[in-house]
Amino acid sequence: MGAETLFGVHLVTLFSLSGAVVMPCWLLLMVAPRWRVTQVLATFVAPLLISALYVSLLVSHKPPPGAGFNSLTQVSVLFSSPYALLAGWIHYLSFDLFTGGWEARDAAQADISQWFVAPCLLLTFFFGPAGLALYLLLKLTLRRGLGATDALA
């Protein structure tokens, strides 16, 4: 990435800033998941802020010719754009953080110790769906089953 900018700010700087927004939230989810401030920041404020950046990236630049979502080749072309690549990264940051916030909130409601949930959160931070799968398996194991309402809650 070179001199690409959004609203006069280099994309490299926006990449760093988006990471700086979510990192404290992940730390709070791991050490103080039941604190109301943690839940507000991690499941609302930070995802909203970086989602606004995501939308700005989407609407400010056209995808390259041949880009799309119908094939791996089209996705590869899409991510050849630094704007789309940053948007994709922010997509991960936002959804993974939102998922981690849900895991922490759900664990608190199910009275699951934060010490059991912390490894799930760490895995969600690094590998999104793998961490969610681990959390769901943890919940299934500790609760000895999920009712239909639990799966939807």
Image (cartoon, rainbow, N blue to C red):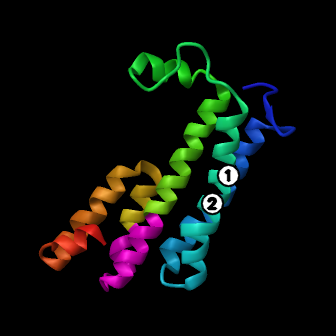
Q: Are the residues flagged by discs 2 and 1 in contact, CB closer than 8 Å?
A: yes
Q: Identify the residue at image location x=61%, y=81%.
A: 37
Q: Residue extending furthest left?
A: 144
Residue 17 forms part of the magenta stretch: no
Taking the image as shown, residue 39 lies to the left or right of residue 19, namely left
Q: Residue extending furthest front?
A: 59
- Which percent across, then down, holds residue 150? 24, 74
- Which percent across, then down, holds residue 128? 41, 51
- Which percent across, then down, holds residue 8? 87, 38
Q: Identify the residue at image location x=63%, y=60%.
A: 48
Q: Which residue is mark 2?
A: 48
- 63 above or below 101? above
- 106 above or below 68? below
- Which percent across, then down, holds residue 113? 34, 82
- 54 above or below 110? above
Q: Identify the residue at image location x=61%, y=71%.
A: 41
Taking the image as shown, residue 139 lies to the left or right of residue 35, namely left
Which span is picked out in magenta? 100-118
Q: Identify the residue at image location x=74%, y=37%.
A: 12
**51 vs 134, nearest the viewer:** 51
Q: Between marks 2 and 1, how big is the CA–CA gap?
A: 6 Å
Q: Which residue is mark 1?
A: 52
Q: Quadrant of residue 70?
A: top left
Looking at the rendered structure, the kind of residue marked 1 is Ala
For the stretch drawn in magenta, the main secondary structure is: helix
